[in-house]
Amino acid sequence: MEQQEALVTQLIQAFQHIRRGHTNMPKMPIRKSEMFTLMQIKKACEVNPEGIIFRDLASVLNLAPPTITPLINSLVKQAYVERIRSEADRRVVYIRLTEKGMSFLDKSERHFNAGVHALVKHLGLEDTKELIRIVNKASTFMNEVWMKEKDKACD
Protein backbone atom coordinates (compact mmCIF):
# COMPACT_ATOMS: atom_id res chain seq x y z
CA MET A 1 0.00 0.00 0.00
CA GLU A 2 2.85 2.34 0.87
CA GLN A 3 4.49 1.59 -2.46
CA GLN A 4 1.26 2.43 -4.30
CA GLU A 5 1.02 5.79 -2.49
CA ALA A 6 4.61 6.55 -3.49
CA LEU A 7 3.78 5.71 -7.12
CA VAL A 8 0.69 7.95 -7.01
CA THR A 9 2.86 10.81 -5.74
CA GLN A 10 5.50 10.18 -8.43
CA LEU A 11 2.84 10.05 -11.17
CA ILE A 12 1.32 13.34 -10.01
CA GLN A 13 4.78 14.91 -10.00
CA ALA A 14 5.46 13.58 -13.50
CA PHE A 15 2.20 15.14 -14.76
CA GLN A 16 3.16 18.42 -13.08
CA HIS A 17 6.58 18.35 -14.79
CA ILE A 18 4.90 17.87 -18.16
CA ARG A 19 2.48 20.69 -17.43
CA ARG A 20 5.33 23.02 -16.37
CA GLY A 21 7.21 22.16 -19.54
CA HIS A 22 4.09 22.97 -21.53
CA THR A 23 3.76 26.37 -19.85
CA ASN A 24 7.39 27.15 -20.72
CA MET A 25 6.60 26.88 -24.43
CA PRO A 26 6.85 30.08 -26.48
CA LYS A 27 3.90 32.40 -25.98
CA MET A 28 1.25 32.11 -28.68
CA PRO A 29 -0.30 35.26 -30.11
CA ILE A 30 -3.76 33.73 -29.62
CA ARG A 31 -5.55 31.82 -26.86
CA LYS A 32 -5.86 28.02 -26.90
CA SER A 33 -9.59 28.29 -27.56
CA GLU A 34 -8.89 30.47 -30.59
CA MET A 35 -6.29 28.00 -31.88
CA PHE A 36 -8.73 25.10 -31.51
CA THR A 37 -11.40 27.15 -33.32
CA LEU A 38 -9.00 27.89 -36.19
CA MET A 39 -8.20 24.20 -36.47
CA GLN A 40 -11.90 23.31 -36.66
CA ILE A 41 -12.55 25.99 -39.28
CA LYS A 42 -9.63 24.68 -41.35
CA LYS A 43 -11.00 21.14 -41.10
CA ALA A 44 -14.45 22.33 -42.20
CA CYS A 45 -12.99 24.29 -45.12
CA GLU A 46 -11.26 21.16 -46.40
CA VAL A 47 -14.76 19.68 -46.89
CA ASN A 48 -16.49 22.91 -47.98
CA PRO A 49 -14.18 25.65 -49.35
CA GLU A 50 -16.93 28.26 -48.79
CA GLY A 51 -16.40 27.84 -45.07
CA ILE A 52 -18.57 26.79 -42.16
CA ILE A 53 -21.75 28.47 -41.03
CA PHE A 54 -21.86 29.87 -37.53
CA ARG A 55 -24.45 27.39 -36.21
CA ASP A 56 -22.43 24.41 -37.47
CA LEU A 57 -19.23 25.79 -35.96
CA ALA A 58 -20.99 26.19 -32.61
CA SER A 59 -22.13 22.57 -32.87
CA VAL A 60 -18.64 21.28 -33.76
CA LEU A 61 -17.12 23.23 -30.86
CA ASN A 62 -19.96 22.08 -28.59
CA LEU A 63 -20.56 25.67 -27.52
CA ALA A 64 -23.57 27.97 -27.57
CA PRO A 65 -23.53 30.62 -30.33
CA PRO A 66 -23.31 33.48 -27.79
CA THR A 67 -20.11 31.88 -26.49
CA ILE A 68 -18.37 31.70 -29.86
CA THR A 69 -19.40 35.17 -31.05
CA PRO A 70 -16.61 36.96 -29.12
CA LEU A 71 -14.19 34.22 -30.17
CA ILE A 72 -14.96 34.76 -33.87
CA ASN A 73 -14.97 38.54 -33.42
CA SER A 74 -11.47 38.32 -31.96
CA LEU A 75 -10.23 36.12 -34.81
CA VAL A 76 -11.79 38.47 -37.39
CA LYS A 77 -10.15 41.46 -35.68
CA GLN A 78 -6.77 39.68 -35.86
CA ALA A 79 -7.46 38.90 -39.56
CA TYR A 80 -7.22 35.11 -39.08
CA VAL A 81 -10.79 34.48 -40.26
CA GLU A 82 -13.36 36.29 -42.34
CA ARG A 83 -17.13 36.29 -42.57
CA ILE A 84 -18.54 35.80 -46.06
CA ARG A 85 -22.24 36.21 -46.92
CA SER A 86 -23.73 33.49 -49.08
CA GLU A 87 -24.60 34.59 -52.62
CA ALA A 88 -27.60 32.25 -52.64
CA ASP A 89 -29.02 33.32 -49.27
CA ARG A 90 -27.82 36.61 -47.79
CA ARG A 91 -28.92 35.47 -44.32
CA VAL A 92 -26.27 32.74 -44.32
CA VAL A 93 -22.78 33.78 -43.22
CA TYR A 94 -19.78 31.51 -43.74
CA ILE A 95 -16.67 31.68 -41.62
CA ARG A 96 -13.39 30.73 -43.24
CA LEU A 97 -9.68 31.19 -42.78
CA THR A 98 -7.88 34.10 -44.37
CA GLU A 99 -4.46 33.68 -45.94
CA LYS A 100 -2.99 35.00 -42.70
CA GLY A 101 -4.98 32.45 -40.70
CA MET A 102 -3.95 29.58 -42.98
CA SER A 103 -0.31 30.65 -42.86
CA PHE A 104 -0.43 30.95 -39.06
CA LEU A 105 -1.96 27.48 -38.68
CA ASP A 106 0.53 25.91 -41.09
CA LYS A 107 3.45 27.49 -39.23
CA SER A 108 2.03 26.43 -35.85
CA GLU A 109 1.50 22.85 -37.03
CA ARG A 110 5.05 22.65 -38.42
CA HIS A 111 6.44 23.99 -35.12
CA PHE A 112 4.37 21.53 -33.07
CA ASN A 113 5.33 18.60 -35.30
CA ALA A 114 9.01 19.55 -35.06
CA GLY A 115 8.71 19.43 -31.27
CA VAL A 116 7.10 15.99 -31.38
CA HIS A 117 9.79 14.76 -33.81
CA ALA A 118 12.43 16.01 -31.36
CA LEU A 119 10.72 14.14 -28.52
CA VAL A 120 10.63 10.91 -30.57
CA LYS A 121 14.30 11.33 -31.37
CA HIS A 122 15.09 11.97 -27.70
CA LEU A 123 13.07 8.97 -26.44
CA GLY A 124 14.00 6.56 -29.22
CA LEU A 125 11.62 4.26 -31.06
CA GLU A 126 11.04 1.69 -28.32
CA ASP A 127 10.34 4.22 -25.55
CA THR A 128 8.10 6.21 -27.92
CA LYS A 129 6.06 3.08 -28.70
CA GLU A 130 5.83 2.32 -24.99
CA LEU A 131 4.74 5.90 -24.22
CA ILE A 132 2.03 5.68 -26.88
CA ARG A 133 0.82 2.36 -25.48
CA ILE A 134 0.69 3.69 -21.92
CA VAL A 135 -0.95 7.01 -22.83
CA ASN A 136 -3.62 5.20 -24.88
CA LYS A 137 -4.26 2.76 -22.03
CA ALA A 138 -4.54 5.63 -19.51
CA SER A 139 -6.81 7.58 -21.84
CA THR A 140 -9.13 4.61 -22.31
CA PHE A 141 -9.32 4.12 -18.56
CA MET A 142 -9.99 7.81 -17.87
CA ASN A 143 -12.70 7.97 -20.54
CA GLU A 144 -14.40 4.92 -19.00
CA VAL A 145 -14.25 6.50 -15.53
CA TRP A 146 -15.65 9.80 -16.82
CA MET A 147 -18.44 8.02 -18.69
CA LYS A 148 -19.44 6.26 -15.48
CA GLU A 149 -19.37 9.58 -13.60
CA LYS A 150 -21.43 11.21 -16.37
CA ASP A 151 -23.98 8.40 -16.16
CA LYS A 152 -24.19 8.81 -12.36
CA ALA A 153 -24.73 12.56 -12.75
CA CYS A 154 -27.65 11.95 -15.13
CA ASP A 155 -29.43 9.59 -12.70
Image: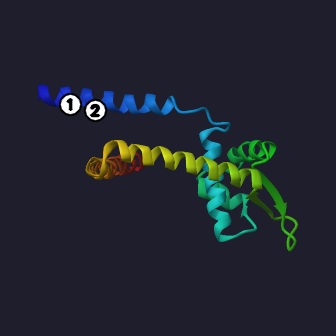
Q: How is the image coloured?
A: rainbow
Name the kind of residue labelled 2 in the image: Leu
Residue nearest the observer in this picture, 52 or 116:
116
Residue projecting furthest to the bottom: 88
Mark 1 vs 2: CB contact within 8 A: yes
Residue nearest the observer in this picture, 23 or 118:
118
Residue depicted at x 48% and y 34% = 22
Residue depicted at x 32% and y 27% = 13
Q: Which mark is residue 102?
A: none
Residue 60 rendering spot, x and y as whole percentages: 60, 58
Relative to 140, is 106 on the left or the right?
right
Number of numbered discs:
2
SS for dot 1 = helix
Residue that mark 1 sits on: 7
SS for dot 2 = helix
Residue depicted at x 68% and y 36% = 29
Neighbours of disc 2 within 10 Å: few (<14), some (14-19), many (20+): few
Relative to 1, is 78 on the left or the right?
right
Name the kind of residue labelled 1 in the image: Leu
Q: State the image quarter where residue 42 is shown.
A: bottom right
Q: Height in image: 96 above or below 9? A: below
Neighbours of disc 1 within 10 Å: few (<14), some (14-19), many (20+): few
Residue 77 rendering spot, x and y as whole percentages: 81, 43
Residue nearest the observer in this picture, 35 or 104:
104
Residue depicted at x 58% and y 53% = 62
State the CA–CA distance, disc 1 to disc 2: 6 Å
Residue 147 rendering spot, x and y as whole percentages: 37, 51
Residue that mark 2 sits on: 11
Q: State the image quarter where residue 71 is shown.
A: top right
